[in-house]
């Protein structure tokens, strides 16, 4: 088969689809890596790499494509690339110059002249050679940025990075990280932070143009955030106000960038990392004013929701608490009482000091303020429970523990059982179980209680109403109700078979029969299989799958 007679040898349908790909310019980055050895990318539902090896006369002696097509024929992607090669050869003429061979014949002076001309006319060549000959130990922020962006550019297709190209996109990032990991904290603390911040910023931008479902990009960001935190925690020299100012100036644009992008928790993590320095000197005023500057930025003020400001206010409170100015802390609580995070901090502080009545008052107030936010209301009630516990107020504790148990919280169920006197417990338990049947979130706890209390009859009734649960619950029923277990399990498998309409669904149902066989024995399973064969004699795929179970 030759480039000039593809249509003769390739099936018409494949040739037409390959021609469509070629005419729509889906063939990208076509290169001749070596004489008559070609490589290209073909865009489609995803990008595929294609290699084609030729003889001098254009005969195809080998080809490869990363698509899953299996046939003796060329796939549509290979056809498209072959057509592109043919066009390229035609445009360049049949007597195209073998550049590599010609270069090998030149003298040193002639090669230098060509290189000097390229350096003058091609900035990319100058950049490539600069990086090629530079000492890798001289990595700086600009070089790190170039290395990262080069990998991103190679992996990007039409401005987007598919999930299977994220590794390629991150090659530059990993190169920078490897360099950073080789630095010594005692000597290179500042450099480690600067390069790590570049990685965080560049990877945040990558998140905006990539399918990041693998989580690799986010992982790199958080690894670099941990590196920054580690270096700040172990800063090798004594701190002074000038050093603090310099580091805050360095972090400021990165924090604002993270706020604006709103893709990770990098802004608050960076801020919390630098606040470690407040424990090593009297810098509270600097940190408080720095946070105020961040909050006043347009990046924060342009946000539709104030959760960003709330997180930073929480950091401001931390600074005041570290400073130990109780009056300033109380004033802060009053001023920013509308933020739930600030109220929570105030409540936790009161709880720590044993001010239980204050905790109860603040929690009840917060439950009213956040009445439309069920998760927060739940948190306030738990803190209120802790205050009741501190005061020994059993009646209120029982009421809250009961409500939490209805939500499926096992810890509070056991607290409830301890709080209720033995004579009253059976009545309380019956009432709780009855209510749990109408609370879906309590289902795991409900079943656990039935098992622990050996309430087998109720467990059986539950399985009759929810036959799919027999898979997990049969061990607790089999001793007392073997016949009923068989009946419910059989009913469950019949339902699966009735709904099945293809081989995959039949296979899945037959896997359940294997579980049934393990639970109830080979005799019971054999009987069930025979029944199913009798009931569905015309379902060939089902019969084949049943045969596979039957033969084992």
Image (cartoon, rainbow, N blue to C red):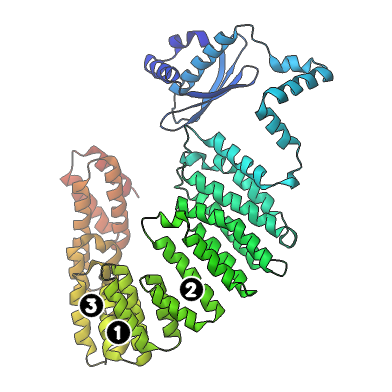
Disc 1, SS: helix
Spatial CA span between label 3 and label 1: 19 Å
User: Label 1 vs label 2: CA separation?
Assistant: 36 Å
Are there few (<14), some (14-19), or many (20+) residues within 10 Å of tag 2?
Answer: many
Q: Is residue 270 left or right of residue 68?
A: right
Using the rendered image of the protein, determine whether residue 221 is visible from the camera's viewpoint: yes
Residue 416 placed where, x, y %?
Answer: 29, 84
Q: CA distance from mark 2 to mark 3?
A: 52 Å
Residue 101 lies left or right of residue 478; in this view the side is right
Q: Nearer the viewer, residue 535 or 375?
A: 375
The answer to whether 162 appears left or right of 191 in the picture is left
Q: Secondary structure at mark 2?
A: helix
| Badge 1: residue crowd in 10 Å (few <14, some 14–19, many ≥20) | many
Question: Up-down: is 106 above or below 481?
Answer: above
Residue in front for this viewpoint, 476 or 315? 315
Q: Relative to residue 22, is residue 516 depicted above or below?
A: below
The residue depicted at 56 percent of the width and 78 percent of the height is 323
Position of residue 326 measured from the top left corner of the image (x, y, whole percent): 49, 83
Q: Are marks 1 and 2 in contact (CB under 8 Å)?
A: no
Q: What element does badge 3 sit on? A: loop
Foreground disc of the pair 2, 3: 2
Q: Earlier in the sequence, mark 1 or mark 2?
A: 2
Asked whether 396 or 495 is in front, the reply is 396
Q: Nearer the viewer, mark 3 or mark 1?
A: 1
Residue at 17 percent across and 65 percent down: it is: 464
Tell me the residue that label 2 is attached to: 317
Q: What residue is shown with label 1?
A: 416
- The residue to which callout 3 is attached is 455
């Amino acid at each position: 088969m030759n480039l000039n007679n593809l249509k003769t040898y390739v099936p018409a349908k494949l040739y037409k689809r390959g021609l469509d790909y070629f005419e729509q310019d889906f063939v990208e980055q076509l290169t001749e890596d070596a004489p008559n050895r070609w490589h290209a990318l073909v865009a489609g539902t995803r990008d595929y790499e294609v290699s084609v090896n030729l003889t001098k006369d254009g005969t195809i002696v080998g080809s490869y494509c990363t698509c899953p097509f299996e046939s003796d024929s060329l796939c549509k992607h290979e056809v498209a690339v072959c057509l592109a090669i043919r066009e390229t050869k035609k445009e360049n003429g049949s007597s195209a110059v073998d550049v590599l061979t010609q270069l090998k014949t030149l003298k040193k002076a002639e090669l230098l002249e060509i290189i000097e001309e390229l350096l003058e006319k091609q900035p990319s060549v100058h950049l490539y050679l600069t990086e090629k000959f530079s000492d890798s130990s001289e990595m700086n922020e600009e070089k790190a940025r170039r290395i990262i962006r080069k990998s991103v550019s190679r992996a990007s297709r039409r401005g987007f990075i598919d999930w299977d190209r994220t590794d390629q996109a991150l090659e530059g990032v990993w190169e920078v990280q490897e360099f950073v990991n080789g630095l010594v904290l005692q000597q290179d603390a500042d450099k480690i932070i600067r390069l790590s911040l570049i990685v965080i910023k560049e990877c945040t931008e990558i998140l905006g143009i990539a399918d990041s479902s693998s989580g690799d990009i986010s992982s790199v960001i958080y690894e670099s955030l941990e590196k920054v935190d580690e270096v700040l925690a172990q800063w090798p020299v004594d701190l002074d106000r000038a050093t603090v100012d310099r580091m805050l100036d360095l972090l400021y644009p990165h924090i604002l960038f993270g706020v604006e992008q709103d893709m990770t928790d990098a802004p608050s993590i960076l801020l919390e990392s630098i606040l470690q320095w407040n424990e090593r000197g009297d810098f509270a005023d600097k940190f408080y004013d720095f946070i105020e500057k961040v909050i006043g930025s347009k990046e924060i003020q342009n946000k539709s929701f104030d959760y960003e400001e709330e997180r930073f206010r929480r950091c401001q409170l931390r600074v005041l608490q570290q400073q130990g100015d109780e009056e300033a802390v109380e004033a802060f609580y009053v001023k920013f009482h509308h933020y739930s995070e600030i109220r929570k901090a105030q409540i936790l502080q009161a709880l720590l000091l044993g001010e239980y009545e204050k905790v109860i008052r603040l929690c009840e107030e917060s439950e009213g303020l956040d009445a439309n936010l069920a998760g927060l209301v739940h948190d306030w009630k738990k803190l209120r429970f802790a205050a009741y516990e501190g005061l020994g107020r059993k009646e209120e504790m029982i009421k809250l523990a009961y409500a939490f148990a209805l939500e499926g919280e096992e810890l509070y169920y056991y607290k409830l059982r301890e709080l209720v006197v033995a004579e009253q417990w059976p009545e309380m338990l019956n009432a709780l179980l009855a209510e749990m049947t109408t609370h879906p979130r309590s289902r795991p706890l409900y079943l656990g209680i039935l098992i622990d209390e050996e309430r087998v009859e109720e467990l059986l009734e539950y399985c009759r109403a929810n036959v799919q649960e027999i898979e997990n619950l049969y061990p607790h029923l089999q001793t007392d109700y073997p016949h009923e277990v068989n009946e419910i399990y059989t009913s469950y498998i019949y339902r699966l078979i009735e709904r099945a309409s293809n081989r995959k669904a039949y296979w899945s149902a037959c896997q359940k029969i294997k579980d049934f066989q393990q639970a109830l024995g080979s005799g019971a399973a054999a009987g069930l299989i025979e029944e199913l064969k009798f009931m569905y004699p015309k379902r060939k795929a089902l019969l084949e799958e049943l045969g596979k179970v039957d033969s084992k």
